[in-house]
Image (spheres, coloured by chain):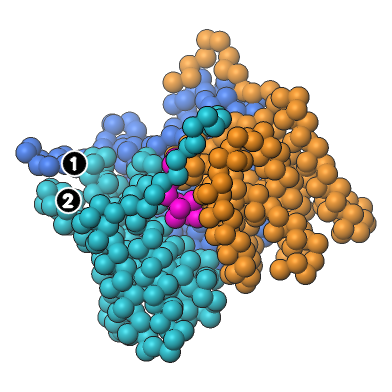
Chain colours: A cyan, B blue, C orange
Amino acid sequence: MFETIASTLDWFGVVVFTVTGCLVASRKQMDIVGFALMGTVTGIGGGTLRDTLLNLPVFWIEEPSYLLTCGVTSVVIFFTAHIPQSRYRTLLWLDAVGLALFAVTGAGRAMDAGVGAAVVVAMGVVTATFGGIIRDLLGGESPVILTREVYITAALAAAAAFIGLIGLGAVREFATAVGFVVGLLVRAAALHFHWSLPRYKPRPGVDTA
Amino acid sequence: MFETIASTLDWFGVVVFTVTGCLVASRKQMDIVGFALMGTVTGIGGGTLRDTLLNLPVFWIEEPSYLLTCGVTSVVIFFTAHIPQSRYRTLLWLDAVGLALFAVTGAGRAMDAGVGAAVVVAMGVVTATFGGIIRDLLGGESPVILTREVYITAALAAAAAFIGLIGLGAVREFATAVGFVVGLLVRAAALHFHWSLPRYKPRPGVDTA
Amino acid sequence: MFETIASTLDWFGVVVFTVTGCLVASRKQMDIVGFALMGTVTGIGGGTLRDTLLNLPVFWIEEPSYLLTCGVTSVVIFFTAHIPQSRYRTLLWLDAVGLALFAVTGAGRAMDAGVGAAVVVAMGVVTATFGGIIRDLLGGESPVILTREVYITAALAAAAAFIGLIGLGAVREFATAVGFVVGLLVRAAALHFHWSLPRYKPRPGVDTA
C-alpha cells in the first residue's frame, strides 16, 4: 500500500475525501451502510472516473485495500462524526489537502498513461473534484463545488504547476511537491481571505428567461 | 438469451428494474420515449457501471436483446402502468427480487473477471443499486436508496454470502441460490417488519453548521 | 482537426453544446472556472460516455484540441453570455443542430466499432442527449431533456435513419446527411409547432402513492 510516496499521498487523499462524504451522510442522518456508500464513493470517485477515461485498470480494483480503507474510515466516522463536525473548519482544511493531493497524483497517473499536457491537467481536476460532485449529487444537494470560492481553480493550478515543471525538466518528486504546495496555498488563501473569482452578472434589461 | 441459469436470472432482473424505472416515469407523467429512457437506464445501469469498472465489454453491447427487452417492457408499462401502480406493494417485492438477483449475478461476473473478494462484493452492490440511484437522480428525486430501510445491506449480504460460499468450496449454482435467498430474505424481512439500521443522530450541543 | 467531414460536424456539435452548458452556468451566476467546467462537461459528455461504453479511446484524450475548444468557447461566452441569452430562441435552434449532429456522428462512431444496429441507435441517442442530462444534473435542475417536447425522439429518428440507410446500401456521406436532416426537421417541427408526444396520465381512482 505504501510502496511509493505517490501511493501514500493518494491513500491520504482517499481517507480525507471519505471523511467529507461521511459528513454529508451524517447531515442526512443516514445509517452505517449509507455512510459507507457515501464515504467510499466520495473517496474513490474521482480516481475511478480518471482511470475509466484513461482506459486504465481502476486503481481500487487492482488494490482493494483502498476499498477496505474507505469502509473502515466510514465506520469510524459513523461513531465519531460529532468530533470532526464540531471541527468543521479543520475539515475544510483537510479537504483542501485532499484536493491538492489528488490534483497532483491524478495528473501524475495521467502523465504515466502518456497523454498530452491539456489532458494531464484535466485529469488532475477530474480526480480532485469528481468525488465531491458525486457526493453532493447523491446527497441531494446542488454540487457546491461549482459555486464554492476558488475550488476547481486550486486543482487547476496544482495540476498545471506539476506538468509545467515536468515540461521544464524538473524531477517528478519536485514537481509533485511544488504542485501540491501551489494547490494547497491557492485553496488556503481562498479560505482565509474569502477569495472568489468574479461571478457572471446578468446585464440589466436582458431577457434571461 | 437463455443459455445459462445466470443469464436467465439476469434477464429477469433487467425486466423488473425496467418496470421500476417506468413507474418513476409515470409519476413524472413522461411520454413514451421518456418511459423507454428511464426504464432502460434503470434496467441496465447497474450492470453497465459494473462492466465499465471491470474493463469488460458492456453486456448489452455484446447482447443487444437486453436493450430490446428494456424497450418492449417500457412500451408495455406505458400502456399498463396503472396496473402495477395500483399494486405498489407487489412492485416493492419485485424490486426486492431484482435486488437479490443482481447482487449475485453481478458478484458472479466480477468473480469471473478474476478480482479479489472485496471487489466481488462491491460489484454485487454496484450492480444491484446503481440502476435505482441513476433512476432517482434522473427523475429529480433524492436517491431513496440511501435512506430506504436495509436496502444496500441486503445486496451486501447476498454478494457476501455468494463469495463466502465459493471461498468455502461450494458449487457455483449452490452459492448463487443461497446468496439470492439471503438477499431476498433480508430485504423481505426489512419490508415486512419495517426494519432499519440505527441512523446517525447529531449530538446535542454540537455545531452542525 | 478537420480531417474529415464527420470530425468537422462533431466539432461544431461540441461548440454548440458547450454554449448551452455555459448558459446554464450564467443562470447560476458561476465564475469563469464554473463556466469552463459546465461548458466542457456539456460539450464532451455525450461522446465521452459513448466511447467509454464502446471501450474506445475517449475522443478528447486522443485529440485534446476538443478540450481546448471547450475552454476557449467557455471564456468567450463568460464575457458575451448576455448576447446569446437575449437570443434564447436562436440558441434553442443551435441546440437542435447539435442534437442532430451528435446523433449521426455518435451512431457513425458506434458503427465503426462494429456493434449491432440497436446499439448504434442507442449510441446516437447517448451522444446527443447525455451532455445535456449531466449539464442539468450539475446545474441542480431536473433534467429538462426528459420532459421537453420530442427531444430524445429527434435523436432516435436521426440515428435510425442513418443506420437504416446504411443497411439499405447507402453511401456513408448520404446516410449522414439524411440522418442529420431528419433529426433537425423533427426537432425543428417540434419547436415550431410545439409538438409533444402524449404523456402518461394517471387513471382516476388509482392509488399513485
Residue A179, percent across and down? Answer: 34, 75
Q: Report the residue that reaches farthest toward the front.
A: A204
Q: Which residue, given by chain and number where applicable, does mark 2 sit on?
A: A88
Q: Tell me which secondary structure the magenta stretch mostly adopts.
A: helix
Residue C155, percent across and down? Answer: 72, 43
Indicate the secondary structure of the residue bearing disc 1. Answer: loop
* Residue A165 lies in the magenta-colored region: no
**Taking A36 as reference, is C78 left or right?**
right
Query: Label 1: how many residues lie within 10 Å, few (<14), some (14-19) or many (20+)?
Result: few
Indicate the secondary structure of the residue bearing disc 2. Answer: helix
Image point 27% across, 40% down: which residue? A28
* Chain of residue at mark 1: B
- What is the span of residues highlighted in magenta in the rendered image? C28-37
**Taking B108 as reference, is C96 left or right?**
right
Q: Which residue, given by chain and number where applicable, does mark 1 sit on?
A: B209
Residue C52, percent across and down? Answer: 59, 62
Q: Does the residue at mark 1 contact the one at mark 2 (Cβ under 8 Å)?
A: yes
